[in-house]
Amino acid sequence: MVSRSLLTTCIMMSFNQTGAMLLFVALCLLMAPVEGYLLQPCEPVNETVSVEKEGCPKCLVFQTSICSGHCLTKEPVYRSPFSMVYQHVCTYRDVRYETIHLPDCPPGVDPHVTFPVALSCDCSLCTMDTSDCTIESLNPDFCMTPRSYVYDY
């Protein structure tokens, strides 16, 4: 009689552990697609950026709209040297260009710098004309020269 209750207890424990494991796996499978929806979508966001120019003694730091957010990507399981993988990044769709005046530039140095302002964004291939496509880049507000701040531009 003792061995039968021990066997029953072992079966119940196995079932409980297996049931808990199956429930955990099922929840993981159900929640995986949700993770992509919880990430910030690709859209214009306000960001502090900096501009500087050779010959001008100061870096100007200000707020503008840039594209930022998550784009769905696919990484192949098997990589072939004959196929190219193109990853989509969050980049500009529609832009407006604005020009800013850098302070204290000496005579003979053009103090104007033109930069893109994001009006709308899209997940597409990276274009080096308007986007930083490097793996590790500098922060957008990085300066090599002393800073000068403009809070609303």
Image (spheres, grey):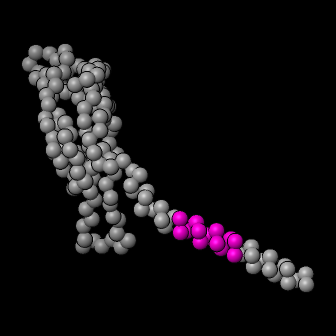
Compared with residue 127, is residue 76 higher up or lower down, i.e. above or below?
A: below
Q: Nearer the viewer, residue 44 or 98?
A: 44
Q: How many circles with numbers are drawn on the protein?
A: 0
Look at the magenta stretch and give its main secondary structure.
helix
Q: Tell me if 18 is positioned left or right of 134 in this view.
A: right
Image quadrant in which the C terminus is located:
top left
The magenta segment? 15-27
Q: Nearer the viewer, residue 99 or 4?
A: 4
Q: Quadrant of residue 85?
A: bottom left
Compared with residue 87, is residue 114 higher up or lower down, i.e. above or below?
A: above
Q: Position of residue 16 (x, y in %)?
A: 70, 71
Please give the name of the residue rendered at 43% of the width and 56% of the height, measured from the top-left corner.
35
Please give the name of the residue rendered at 51% of the width and 64% of the height, measured from the top-left corner.
28
Q: Is residue 36 magenta?
A: no
Please give the name of the residue rendered at 16% of the width and 17% of the height, measured from the top-left corner.
105
Q: Quadrant of residue 119?
A: top left
Q: Position of residue 46 (x, y in %)?
A: 29, 34
Q: Position of residue 116 (x, y in %)?
A: 17, 37
Q: Position of residue 101 (x, y in %)?
A: 16, 22
